[in-house]
Amino acid sequence: MRDERLTKLADMMVRYSAGVREGEQVLITGGAAAAPLIREVYASVLDAGAVPVTLVSLPGLQEVFFEHARDAHYQKTPAIMQSIYEQADAFVQIMAPENTRALSGVDPKKQRALALRDKHLTDLVIERDRWILTLYPTNALAQESEMSLREYEEFVFSALALDREDPASFWRARSSEQRRLAERLERAREVRIVGPQTDLTLSVEGRKFLEDSGQHNLPCGEIFTGPVEDSAEGRIYFGVPTAVGGREVSGVSLTFREGRVVEASAEKGEEYLLSMLDTDEGARYLGELGIGTNYEIPRATRSILFDEKLGGTVHLALGQSYSQTGGRNSSGVHWDLICDLRQSGELYADGELLQKDGRFVGFEL
């Protein structure tokens, strides 16, 4: 039976998020498990008069690559892949993992090498600014979230506002309040994050704050910028666990001096954390400060795409900046770590209380 929520989601990604126009070429990438949504996106692109091009990955191919790839395979992006990305006008990416721990035994150095090989493709997509990323509910994601598949589907579709008649209108309305918050933060010189095992200050002077109400991520709901690269001072504790690179990383503590991570530890996954920090020089500096504004998400699920939007949290990304914010950090890494401020947490802008215990002061979000 056709799920009308998938039709809504596809149309929202194609028309509202990516703004696909007649005659354009749209690259659709995703896992095979997302086939129902990929079909809906494919149809929506055709209905818009554009040309859909699909790249669907099969389960287990990544493991095969890391097992059999030689040094030469990590040196250069295949020319055919380069050409596809260069000629695409818009990008739709659908994550649909069937085993979130499939890469747990892979050497992190190999994962870093592949990410560095294809970094220029990621840069191209971001600079073109016509991309949208979402996930399709799978059993693996439901298991990570400690839910049944049916419960997880309802959780996902609710967070995306797909249970509403017109989700795009819902997010357009939410956008105005997020812009007001972004404008307040753009007047600030310094942001301070205070919470359990956390007291961190960083400069945002001269940086642009962007808001995402469905333009690039679904679920959406965040305000973000690139902090001044050498400004972070203090310590922060990221208590929200994440499943990344086939591993769980949780209980991360980072200490910053002059913007650089000088001390790092994790209660789980510390070896992976330290490995990522050694990817390149930029991996020890911040590329993003984000503030979650989506209170439709009730709890964390070990999915960064969802958890970084959770209302009452902030996230800091190690590594690559978004140039649109004025950020200048360069790295093969962009890894969001999430700090929960919903209990005994505070957020300040130039000393003025902006948020307390996960709720904004003076903003209706």
Image (cartoon, grey):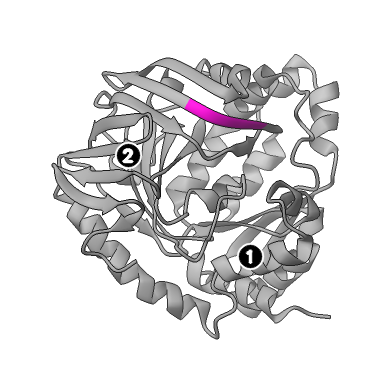
**Residue 249 on the magenta span:** yes
Residue 46 appears at what percent x and percent y?
Answer: 67, 75
Magenta segment: 248-252
Q: Quadrant of the C terminus?
A: bottom left
- Magenta stretch, overall SS: strand
Looking at the image, residue 201 sits to the left or right of residue 114; the answer is left
Q: Check whether the beta carbons of the residues at disc 1 and disc 2 lie within 8 A of each other.
A: no
Q: Quadrant of the N terminus?
A: bottom right
**Seen from this angle, which residue lies furthest front?**
344
> Residue at the location (50% across, 27% down)?
252
Viewer-side residue, 85 vs 109: 109
What mark, if any, has residue 226 been given in the picture?
Answer: 2
Q: According to the image, label 1 marks what residue?
A: 155
> Residue at the location (47% across, 64% down)?
214
Query: Which secondary structure, mark 1?
Result: helix
**Image position of 165 with respect to 286: above or below:** below
Residue type at mark 1?
A: Phe
Residue type at mark 2?
A: Gly
Query: Which secondary structure, mark 2?
Result: loop
